[in-house]
Image (spheres, rainbow, N blue to C red):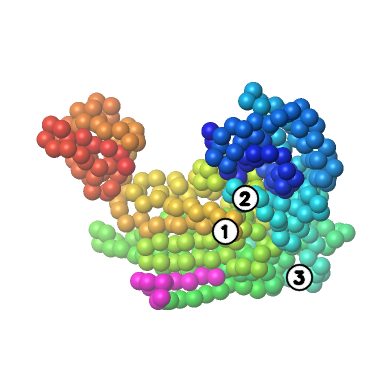
Amino acid sequence: MQKENKFLEYKQAVSKSYLKTVSAFANYNDGQIVFGLSDDLRVIGIDCPIDVCLNIENQINDSIKPRPDYELKINKDNTISLFVKRGRNTPYRFDGKAYKRSDTSTVEVDDIEEKRLILSGMNISFEELSCGEDDLKFDYLGEKLSEALNLENFGLDTMKSLNLYNQKTGYNNAAKLLADHNDFPGLDVAVFGNSINVFRKRRTFSGESLLKQYFDCIELYKDEYVVEKIADGLRQKSELIPIDAFREALANALVHRVWDIKADTKVEMHPDRVIISSPGGLPADMSVDDYVRGNYSYLRNPILANVFRRMNIIEAFATGIRRINEAYKDVPSKPVYNVSNASVSVTLPIIDKAKLTEGERRVLDSLKENRLYSRAEIEKISGTAKDTLIRILNSLIEKGFIEKAGQARGTSYRKK
């Protein structure tokens, strides 16, 4: 039997405490409550389940406002399943309070979270709200947009077309974030030495356009991770961390973060990695797996995202995470994604090994993970000659892509 989780709760009997979880599911995620199971997941069942279902219906209809969408089912073992669907008219309150799930627990939302639920129920995002200021300046935004779009004139009509200005409500929060001066949280960048106790540089970009913060941070990245090497008598630039991955991770952190939290977006630059952290967890209807795989994109701030897209900083579709992963395709070190209720962070490691050759990629792609292969098997499935294959296998072992097991005729290889 499946254990309790964010989307599933078990109750031995029907007591009004379950109504908090009904509120949580209706506010954030579809979920299920099963009545008639003990704490150790033994089936107890419910006496008179038809009458109990009627009682549950009355309790939900009387206690949850507005009324959520739900279904009840009596199971063969006399347990009762209550399926609650996420609603659009948030917040759904029980006894005047709204709730959310925190792992396997149900907790009351705080004031900030309730405001978000209210905006969501009105189909309004924080960035759409009027900022209440009409004297904002946009010199930097105008300069960058003119460069990217070949604009001859930048003015109020451009702001309207980008949904940054409305005739009735004026400039919104998205516009203020892009203004030359604003009081939103900034971008806190720390460049570390060989330990976190050694600061080589510390820069805080704040009080200025979000676009300027982005481009200034890119320049700081270049100072630290784009190096020059001499090869064949020629000076060549090399990226210790792929610039495409850094750009995507930084843009995602700024565009998709929660902006009603008074906390800076953080960039930690270490000798062997960069960690980019943005306040606020994932949107309620996005799972960690969806995020890491880049299955789809939920635009928390679609107005900001549109501006960044117009400037070719981000793509229109859910390709950010996939583009980061693609930048690390041919190296053993991979990005690491950490998600909590409070933040989302991406760790980009230094590329410390040479990239794969075409032959190495062909051999590696022919292997399945967690399976042992003999050299003869690899020779057959990859179509690589024996002498060439031996050289390639040794190179892949050195680069950390495969591992070797056994000896002599018992030697086998496994993809890491």
Pointers 1 and 3 in contact (C-beta within 8 Å): no
**Helix, strand or loop under label 1:** strand
Left or right side of 328 for 88: right
Pointers 1 and 2 in contact (C-beta within 8 Å): no
Q: Is residue 117 magenta?
A: no
Q: Is residue 49 above or below residue 284?
A: above
Q: Amino acid at mark 2?
A: Ser
Image coordinates for residue 60, horizontal then vertical, percent? 80, 40
Mark closest to the chain's N terminus, 2 or 3: 2
Left or right side of 160 for 367: left
Residue at figure coordinates x 28%, y 48% from the top left? 400
Q: Residue furthest right?
A: 168
Residue occupied by mark 1: 343
Q: Nearer the viewer, residue 276 or 312?
A: 276
Image coordinates for residue 416, horizontal then vertical, percent? 32, 42
Residue at figure coordinates x 55%, y 55% from the top left? 340
Q: Which mark is residue 247?
A: none
Q: Amino acid at mark 1?
A: Ser
- Which tag is nearer the camera, tag 1 or tag 3? 1
Decide: few, some or many residues near mark 2? Use Cα within 10 Å; few <14, some 14-19, many ≥20.
Answer: few
Residue occupied by mark 3: 136
Q: CA distance from mark 1 to mark 3?
A: 30 Å
Image coordinates for residue 2, horizontal then vertical, percent? 54, 36
Q: CA distance from mark 1 to mark 2?
A: 19 Å
Q: Which residues are magenta?
A: 188-198
Residue occupied by mark 2: 105
Residue at figure coordinates x 34%, y 36% from the top left? 369
Residue 331 in sight from this viewpoint: yes
**Helix, strand or loop under label 3:** loop
